[in-house]
Image (cartoon, grey):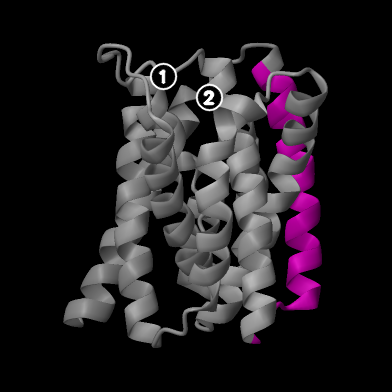
């Protein structure tokens, strides 16, 4: 498939992810890894697109006072500095793609988890547990370029930690701040790299797709089918990266 089709693909990805409160970083990384070889460019591009998609939703959540800083600050306090530090870690190309492959497989699993009907008993998190969970996801976010909300939101929803809308607002803000922290870390490490012509087209695609997705979510359109296809894609690319860079097997 030609790289010229990327804006169309990213438009569809942003459409789905924005409808469920995510930025789309896992799928952006999955697709970019099929077309680009420079992992610094892959990571930088995914973080920029994450920010573009979740900015509007984040501002809306804050404006409508769904975002509760008293509940959320422990998640963010640990994740922001660790995302910044994670982005500065210099990895070999093989190490990066192996970590990314593992992260994508986890992301695909958590995406599928969103569609399960099973719920566990309601759980309350102490502040140290919130910081540990947020910090761990923040570190992975910085290293890989995944915003982290795709891990955090399904876990909190499964455990019935709070109302789904409250969890969605946390996921949106979590992705936003960690993506920004990751970009700052890339700048500090001198590994921030973008293809200006490509990123402009992709930004336009995800902004349009994200805006439509946010509208559809408010109208309660069912985008489950697109979500299942996206999760399968992410799982496939994650497995492909691990086999290719870990064992030299191409699928």
Picture residue at 68% right of the left edge, 46% below the top: 11
- Whether residue 192 appears in this view of the structure is no
Count of picture labels? 2
Q: Position of residue 31 (x, y in %)?
A: 50, 61
SS for dot 1: loop
Q: Is residue 196 magenta?
A: yes
Question: Which residue is painted at 56% across and 61% down in the image?
Answer: 81
Q: Which mark is residue 126?
A: none
- Look at the image and tell me in which quarter the C terminus lies: bottom left
Other residues around mark 1 within 10 Å, as few (<14) / some (14–19) / many (≥20):
some
Q: Dividing the picture into quarters, in which one does residue 123 lie?
A: top left
Q: Which of 124/204 is in front?
A: 124
Instruction: Identify the disc placed on residue 161.
Output: 1
User: Which region is colored magenta?
Assistant: 190-217
The front one of 233 and 242 is 242
Is label 1 in contact with label 2 (beta carbons under 8 Å)?
yes
> What's the magenta bit mostly, secondary-structure-wise?
helix
Q: Is residue 143 magenta?
A: no
At 71% from the left and 27% from the top, the residue drawn is 214
Residue depth check, mark 1 versus mark 2: number of the one nearer the observer? 1
User: Quadrant of residue 93 in the image?
Assistant: bottom left
Q: State the CA–CA distance, disc 1 to disc 2.
A: 8 Å
């Amino acid at each position: 498939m030609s790289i010229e089709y990327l804006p169309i693909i990213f438009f569809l990805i942003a459409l789905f992810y924005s409808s469920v409160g995510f930025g789309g970083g896992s799928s952006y990384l999955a697709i970019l890894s099929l077309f680009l070889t420079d992992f610094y460019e892959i990571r930088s591009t995914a973080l920029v697109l994450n920010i573009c998609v979740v900015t509007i939703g984040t501002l809306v959540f804050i404006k409508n006072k769904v975002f509760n800083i008293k509940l959320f600050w422990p998640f963010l306090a640990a994740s922001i500095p660790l995302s910044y530090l994670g982005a500065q870690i210099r990895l070999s190309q093989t190490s990066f793609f192996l970590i990314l492959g593992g992260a994508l497989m986890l992301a695909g699993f958590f995406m599928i988890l969103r569609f399960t009907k099973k719920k566990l008993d309601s759980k309350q998190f102490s502040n140290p547990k919130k910081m540990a969970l947020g910090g761990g996801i923040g570190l992975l976010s910085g290293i890989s370029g995944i915003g982290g909300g795709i891990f955090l939101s399904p876990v909190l929803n499964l455990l019935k930690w709070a109302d789904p809308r409250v969890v969605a607002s946390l996921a949106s803000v979590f992705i936003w701040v960690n993506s920004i922290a990751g970009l700052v870390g890339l700048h500090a490490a001198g590994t921030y790299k973008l293809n200006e012509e490509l990123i402009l087209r992709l930004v336009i695609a995800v902004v349009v797709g994200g805006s439509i997705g946010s509208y559809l979510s408010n109208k309660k359109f069912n985008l489950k089918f697109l979500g299942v296809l996206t999760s399968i894609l992410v799982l496939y690319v994650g497995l492909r990266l691990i086999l290719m860079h870990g064992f030299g097997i191409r699928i």
